[in-house]
Structure formats: structure tokens, C-alpha cells
Amino acid sequence: MRGFHALTAWVICSCMHYSLGVLPGNPRIVDLTHTLVNGLVYWPGEVHYQWNMGFRGMTPGGFYLENNDFQSSEHSGTHVDAPAHMAEGKWKADQIQLERLTGPGVVVDLWEKNVTSDYLVSQQDFQDWEEKHGRIPDGCILMIHTGWAKRYWDGGQLAYMGSTNESGLSFPGLDPAAARWLADNRGMHAVGIDTCSVDSAKTEAKGSHTTLFALNIPFLENVANLDQLPATGSTIFALPIKIGGGSGAPARIIAIINGDTSAAASGPRQGLIGIGVLALVAILAFNVI
């Protein structure tokens, strides 16, 4: 009996180590985040991101140390827009529920439609996607891939945003009418896009922001590498800096691509944990006997 207990305990430890230390199935992880560096594009009028080297060298205590500082707008680089950004009384950056920042990835790919700076993503674009892939699922992270991200580094401020001042901005975005359709008919957790704003520069009154923010749906902006994601079959995690009272925050956004792990709380990991639980039950049962 002692041998059985030892074997079962080993099974539990092995399962726990695997489930906590390694992603089951060795999935592919895609970084959807632009690196924050000096000189990146910025929204006109906001504080530029600025990184400054601090101390770098050996300390009197005999160990090596690096220490730096930075300043930044809440909306620098790849970031999350909190609903409070344009909807009074809605969630601030530190109030967004983590469940709303993760979910199955849905990527609406508009690359082949030759998106221009005047393009407005329409209800028809979403319905065309659904004809191929099925209904946009509730709880998803809905990503819009316009192809604009390639301009983020290659063309600089003018190519990506059209201007260095707010009056001349030009880039594609979500049609407010399409945002209203999503709000009324679909239950996504968040909406992301590979441009500097979900609302096009041509959109007055920020209609897409205000419509979806009213439902506490956060936005993910300046998203990178959406061309590396499938239309479905990924799980997206968008984790902003937890800024108290923030209207938004820079974020690290990643996608895990593996059909078995495309739902955040299911798949092989749960199975492994289940094996550990069963083994623990077996130990308790034999102890009672």
C-alpha cells in the first residue's frame, strides 16, 4: 500500500508540474505588441514616450545593476483603451475585469480589400466573415486586421497617422454604424485594431468609441502581427498596466495558437489537473480503507 501511495503522489506532482510549468501541446505564441522605444508614433498633443538610461554598472555592494526610467501617455504604443476614456462612469483601466481581457481570438482580415486611409470597416465586412467562419462568438476578442500595422515602423508618423497634428490625421477605422450593429447583436469581450484608433480619423464624435464603451467594452489599439493569426483557433490575452484611475494603459498582448487551448479554461491542462484530482481522491480513499 505504501508503494501505491508513493506512486500516486508522484503522478500528482508530475501533473501539477506539467500543468503549471509548460503550456500543454507546446502551442505557438504570437506577440501582438509593438515595442516601446524612443521615437515611436504618438497621438498629437499627448506626452511622447521617453525612455532614459539611469544607472548601469557595478554597485558598492559588489553586484551589477541596471536602472532606468520612462515617461509616457496612457495611450502610447500598443495599449488598452478603458471604457472611461470616453464614457463617464464606466470602467477605468484598473477596473476592467480580467475576464474581459481574454478570450477566443476572432480575426476579421480585410487585407485583400485594399484598405485605404478612408476605409470604414462595415457591418458587411463582419457578415462576410461570418459567412465563411460562422457567427462571431460571445466572449471573443474581436480583432480587425487592416494591414495598417506595417506602416507603424516602416513609414513613421506620416505613413501611419497621416499627419503630425490632429487636424490632418488619416487612417482607417470602424464605422460607427457597424459598431452599433456589434453592440446590438454580438457579445464580444473587447475589440482590437492594428491602427492608432478604433474610430477612423474621419469619424466625427468618436461614435464607435462611445457606442461600445457604453457597454464597458474596452478597445485594443496599435495591435501588431495580426497577419500571423488564423481567423479562429487562438486565445488572446491583453494585459494593460494596472494604472489606478487610468483612462487606458500600455499593454502586452499575446495570442496562443493551438486548437486544444483556444478556450482559456478548457483543454489538456484541465485534463491534467483532473488526473491529479483523481489521484488525490484515490489516496484519500485508500487512507480511509
Image (spheres, grey):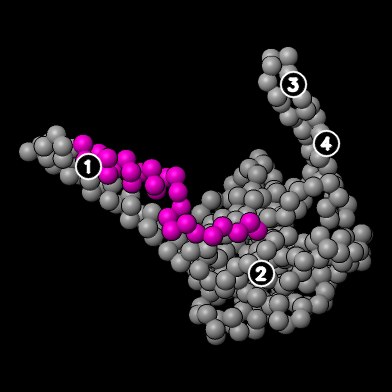
Which numbered tag is attached to residue 52?
4
Secondary structure at numbered mark 3: strand
Of marks 2 and 3, the one in the foreground? 3
Q: Which residue is mark 2?
A: 227
Magenta-colored span: 6-32
Secondary structure at numbered mark 2: helix
Quick one: label 1 or label 4, which is nearer the N terminus? 1
- Which residue occupies 79% across, 27% down? 55
Image spot of residue 236 (x, y percent)? 56, 59
3D distance between C-alphas at marks 1 and 4 = 53 Å
Q: Is residue 266 left or right of residue 101?
A: left
Of marks 1 and 4, the one in the foreground? 1
Of marks 1 and 2, the one in the foreground? 1
3D distance between C-alphas at marks 1 and 2 = 45 Å
3D distance between C-alphas at marks 2 and 3 = 43 Å
Which numbered tag is attached to residue 8?
1
Which numbered tag is attached to residue 242?
none
**Camera-side residue: 285 or 63?**
63
Does 69 appear above or below 121?
above
Q: Quadrant of residue 69?
A: top right
3D distance between C-alphas at marks 3 and 4 = 19 Å
Secondary structure at numbered mark 4: strand
The reply to whether residue 134 is visible in this rendering is yes
Quick one: label 3 or label 4, which is nearer the N terminus? 4
Quick one: label 2 or label 3, which is nearer the N terminus? 3
Q: Quadrant of the C terminus?
A: top left
Q: Which residue is mark 3?
A: 58
